[in-house]
Amino acid sequence: MLPMSKTAILSLALGLTLLVTACASAPFTGRRQFLFTSEGSETRMGYQAFEQMKRQYKLSQDPDTNALVAKVGRRIADAAQRPDYRWEFVVLEGKEANAFCLPGGKVGIFTGVLKYTKDEAGLATVISHEVAHALARHAGERMSQSMLAQAGGIGLGAALGGVGSLAGTAIMQGYSLGTQLGILLPYSRTQESEADHIGLILMAKAGYDPAQALDFWRRMMTKDKGGKLPQFMSTHPNDANRLKELEEFLPEARQYYVPAREAQSLPPSAPAPPAAPAAGQWMPAVK
């Protein structure tokens, strides 16, 4: 039996306390979440990261593209009903078919994804998916999961104090691999599926036919036909599973559908007060 030090006992006790006290629920889906960070701190880090992204990438000067992104973004933001977010939508020059939404409503669309969006509904699919990540506080969840995994590693390392170096190293490597494949990657896939789910609802509330989201995802799935990782080692659901889940989410999303004319009459989101500057650095995991 491995010896248990005071450090290990305290680490395990801390982990159990966090699990008991940090419960929350994701919007629309009701999924139970463990969040050890405050939404305010996540937002401050998101604002700082957004400024870094705007310095790192060139902003698009195409007026038509910027106007379309602003129009679609505002409709999705109104549907999200978070007037406390300081919504901002920018188009970044980049070949990657990516987009992101940071905590607090900062949205970036890379020009590389526009060849797959094709139309307004396709763009709405992208923006609503990314906004869903922010609404569900997925960035905070990932930070919380990393904190919990780190606490577990510290506790395990303390508990291995009496084990030989080779055996201890092997156990720690196994723990690291098991944590990555058994917790963090599946957790990320859960978030992606949830963002698809919530994104369809936001899209419908904003007046876009949620069924058109499937057209966009099918176009995206043609961009990388080879060399894909097995799903258990990927941060995203595989193509077949994603389409199947999207089809399963559609009936619920259609219940929120509002014709575009009515959607445009929704009251605009009120501006939020300026955020305090954040300390430290944090960069997003762009999807």
Image (tube, rainbow, N blue to C red):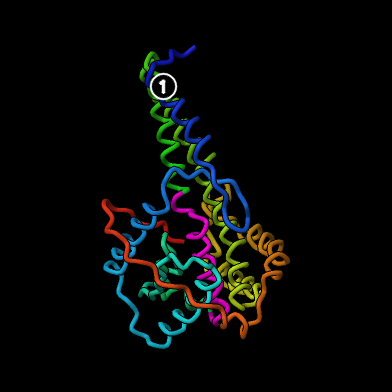
Q: Secondary structure at mark 1?
A: helix
> How many marks on residues?
1
Foreground residue among 142 and 84: 84
Q: Is residue 207 magenta?
A: no
Please state the horizontal and vertical placement of residue 197, each as a whole percent of the image: 62, 61
Q: Is residue 51 above or below residue 280?
A: below
Foreground residue among 84 and 109: 84
Please state the horizontal and vertical placement of residue 43, each as a whole percent of the image: 38, 57
Please state the horizontal and vertical placement of residue 92, each as a whole percent of the image: 36, 73
Q: Is residue 277 above or below residue 83?
A: above
Residue at x 35% of width, y 75% of height: 93
Please name the predominant secondary structure of the magenta segment in the image. helix
Residue at x 29% of width, y 59% of height: 276
Which stretch did the figure color magenta?
118-140
Query: Residue under circle 1?
Result: 8
Foreground residue among 147 and 84: 84
Q: Is residue 189 above or below residue 21?
A: below
On the picture, is 151 further left or further right than 205? left
Please state the horizontal and vertical placement of residue 29, each as a whole percent of the image: 63, 55
Q: Residues within 10 Å of mark 1 (few under 14, many from 20)?
A: many
Amino acid bearing label 1: Ala
Residue at x 47% of width, y 77% of height: 114
Residue at x 42% of width, y 53% of height: 39
Q: Is residue 132 magenta?
A: yes
